[in-house]
Image (tube, rainbow, N blue to C red):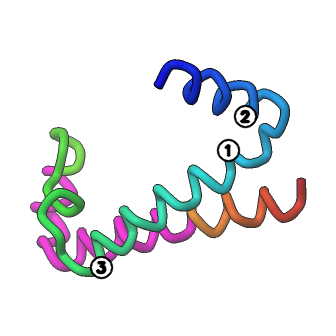
Amino acid sequence: MEKLLSQAKEFMELNPEYGYILAGIVLLIVSIGNFLNWNWATSPADYKQRYWSSILGHDAFRRVMGLLFLIGSIACFTAFYLS
């Protein structure tokens, strides 16, 4: 396991642009979770998110968060493409 982690670290050091792909995939999964109303993705984590959730309502909050994560994912994929 340690050898595998060492190889992954070495690969990322030689090819840092693949970090954009990894971040894009994670953001896309969280975005999909928000749009499909999965609990782990839509529950507000801190007081700022709870505040916006109470102002906007749960459905609007999860759609806004899903859209923001989707924009972040698109930005990561674009950064990979441009690098």
Do the residues under discs 1 and 2 have CB atoms within 8 angstroms?
yes
Q: Is residue 79 above or below residue 34?
A: above
Q: Quadrant of residue 72?
A: bottom right
Which residue in the structure is indicated by mark 1? Answer: 19
The amino acid type of the residue labelled 3 equals: Phe
Residue 64: % across, % down: 35, 71
- Answer with mark 1 or mark 2, whichever residue precedes in sequence: 2
Q: Which mark is residue 35?
A: 3
Residue at position x 23%, y 60% in the image = 41
Which residue in the structure is indicated by mark 2? Answer: 12
The one of 8 and 47 positioned closer to us in this rendering: 8
Residue at position x 82%, y 39% in the image = 15
Q: Secondary structure at mark 1?
A: helix
Residue 55: % across, % down: 15, 64
Q: CA distance from mark 1 to mark 2?
A: 7 Å
In front: mark 1 or mark 2?
2
In front: mark 3 or mark 2?
2
Number of marks in the rendered image: 3
Q: CA distance from mark 3 to mark 2?
A: 31 Å
Residue at position x 46%, y 25% in the image = 1
